[in-house]
């Protein structure tokens, strides 16, 4: 079972009424449990298979914006009908595919369902995170090259 299949399985479980699911294959075991607050836990065998990208991308920490500049770039958010794009995993958040490439999205960018909005690196795997909503990016809640937690808000999107 590859990482993308696990991600898809988690999404299906989150949207269903299934409380717990366990899958065992040879030396691999995964258990996904859904609680009332939808916390998901993983259990793996002692010998997991580690996948490495053939050409790993090296990132450098981006300098943080001074607070006054960040405030100027973020428009005042008045609408409470915003949709939050959340992190589907634990890892390191990146706003661009590689250091020399342009950002996936910026404040004011239009996104559609399926558009890649960022990358989260987890265990040397670079996972593209796609928008599940169409609209306009209103606010980016995470700095580039910083760690994120599961279910942490990443972007605010105005769906109108």
Image: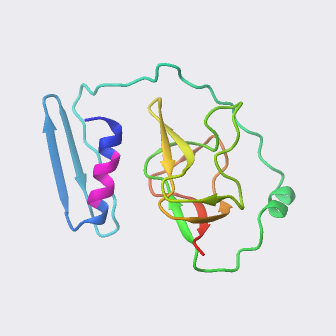
Classify the position of the N terminus by image quarter. top left
Residue 24 position in % (x across, y down): 14, 39
In the drawing, does residue 57 fall left or right of residue 78? left
Asked where in the image residue 50 lies, by quadrant, the reply is top left
Rendering colour mode: rainbow
Quadrant for the C terminus in the image: bottom right
Q: How many marks can you see?
A: 0
**Res. 115 in view:** yes
Depth order, front residue of 44/50: 50
Q: Where is residue 154 in the image (x, y as percent from the top left)?
A: 57, 57
Q: In this view, does 56 lie to the left or right of 44?
A: right
Residue 136: image quadrant is bottom right
Is residue 40 at least partly visible in the picture?
no
Whether residue 38 is in magenta: the answer is: no
Residue 71 appears left or right of 140: right
Secondary structure predominantly adopted by residues drawn in magenta:
helix
Q: Which residue is drawn at 53% across and 23% down?
A: 56
Question: Toward the viewer: 86 or 37?
Answer: 86
Kindly give the residue lying farthest to the top in the view shown: 54
Residue 9 lies in the magenta stretch = yes
Q: What residue is at 71 percent from the left and 40 percent from the top?
A: 102
**Residue at figure coordinates x 47%, y 29% from the top left:** 124
Start and end of the magenta stretch? 7-13
Q: Which residue is drawn at 73% across and 38% down?
A: 62
- Residue 10: x %, y % from top left: 31, 53
Q: Residue 98's x, y, as percent?
A: 64, 32
């Amino acid at each position: 079972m590859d990482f993308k299949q696990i991600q898809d399985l988690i999404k299906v479980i989150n949207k269903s009424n299934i409380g717990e699911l366990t899958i065992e294959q040879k030396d691999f075991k995964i258990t996904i449990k859904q609680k009332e607050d939808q916390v998901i836990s993983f259990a793996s065998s002692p010998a997991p298979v580690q996948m490495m990208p053939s050409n790993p991308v090296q990132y450098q920490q981006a300098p943080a914006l001074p607070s006054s500049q960040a405030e100027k770039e973020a428009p005042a958010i008045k609408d409470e009908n915003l949709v939050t794009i959340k992190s589907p995993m634990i890892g390191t958040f990146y706003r661009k595919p590689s250091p020399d490439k342009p950002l996936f999205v910026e404040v004011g960018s239009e996104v559609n369902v399926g558009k890649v909005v960022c990358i989260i690196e987890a265990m040397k795997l670079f996972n593209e995170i796609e928008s599940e909503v169409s609209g306009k990016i209103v606010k980016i809640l995470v700095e580039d090259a910083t760690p994120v937690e599961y279910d942490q808000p990443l972007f605010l999107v105005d769906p109108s």
